[in-house]
Image (cartoon, helix red, strand yellow):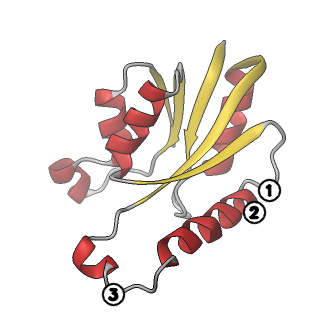
C-alpha cells in the first residue's frame, strides 16, 4: 500500500484517466495523499512575449478548473497544474514531493513511440518510485 500516489492526467481520450484514479484509490493506504497532476508544455519565450500580460496565469487556472471537472470531484484527490516537459516534470514532481507510487495511463504504442518513446515509458525508466501503467 502506498502513502503518496501521483496520477498524471492527460486531456486525451485514448488514456484511461478514470481507471488510473480508480487504481490509485485501490492501492493507497487509508488517509493516503492522491494527487492528480496535469503538465502544460511550456510556451517558448519568443511566443509568450506576444501574449497579453497575465494570460499564462489565467490559462493555468482555466486548465486547473477543467482538470477538477474531468476528475469529477473525486474525494480526497488534490489537483495540481504545472508547466514543463511532461515526462521530466512528472518524475521531478514525484521526487520533490515524496511520491511513493505513480499511476500513469498509457495508450497502445504506435510506430512513433518506438522512435521517440511515450511519456509513460520515460516515466517508467526514470522514476525513483514504483510506477503502475494502465492501458
Q: Under tag 3, what secondary structure?
A: loop
Numbered circle sitting on residue 72: 1
**SS at badge 2:** helix
Dot 3 corresponds to which residue? 50
Identify which residue, 13 or 126, lies in the foreground.
126
* Distance in Å between CA atoms under marks 3 and 1: 34 Å
Which image quadrant for residue 51? bottom left
Q: Quadrant of the N terminus?
A: top right
Residue 102 percent location from the top left of the image: 51, 30
Give the residue at x 64% y 61%: 64
Residue identifier under label 2: 69
Q: Nearer the viewer, mark 3 or mark 1?
A: 3
Q: Where residue 84 appears, x then y in whole percent?
A: 36, 53
Real-space Cα separation, disc 2 to disc 1, in angstroms: 5 Å
Q: Is residue 84 above or below residue 35?
A: below
Residue 134 seen anywhere in this rendered image of the structure:
no
Residue 75, given in percent of the width and then of the height, sits at 84, 41
Instruction: Report the residue at 64% width, 16% height from top.
Output: 2
Taking the image as shown, residue 94 lies to the left or right of residue 7, namely left
Kindly check if marks 2 and 1 are in contact, taking CB atoms under 8 A apart as contact: yes
Q: Quadrant of residue 96?
A: top left
Q: Residue at x 70, y 41 (%)?
A: 78
What residue lies at 36% left-to-right and 26% top-to-bottom? 127
Q: Secondary structure at mark 1?
A: loop
Do residues under tags 3 and 1 come within 8 Å of each other at their CB atoms? no
Amino acid at each position: 500500500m502506498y502513502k503518496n500516489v501521483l496520477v498524471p492526467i492527460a486531456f486525451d481520450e485514448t488514456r484511461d484517466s478514470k481507471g488510473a484514479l480508480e487504481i490509485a484509490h485501490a492501492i493507497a493506504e487509508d488517509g493516503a495523499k492522491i494527487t492528480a497532476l496535469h503538465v502544460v508544455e511550456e510556451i517558448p519565450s519568443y511566443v509568450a512575449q506576444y501574449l497579453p500580460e497575465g494570460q499564462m496565469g489565467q490559462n493555468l487556472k482555466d486548465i486547473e478548473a477543467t482538470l477538477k471537472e474531468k476528475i469529477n470531484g473525486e474525494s480526497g484527490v488534490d489537483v495540481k497544474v504545472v508547466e514543463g516537459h511532461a515526462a521530466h516534470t512528472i518524475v521531478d514532481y514525484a521526487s520533490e514531493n515524496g511520491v511513493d507510487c505513480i499511476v500513469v495511463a498509457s495508450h497502445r504504442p504506435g510506430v512513433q513511440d518506438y522512435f521517440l518513446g511515450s511519456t509513460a515509458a520515460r516515466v517508467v525508466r526514470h522514476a525513483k518510485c514504483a510506477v503502475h501503467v494502465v492501458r
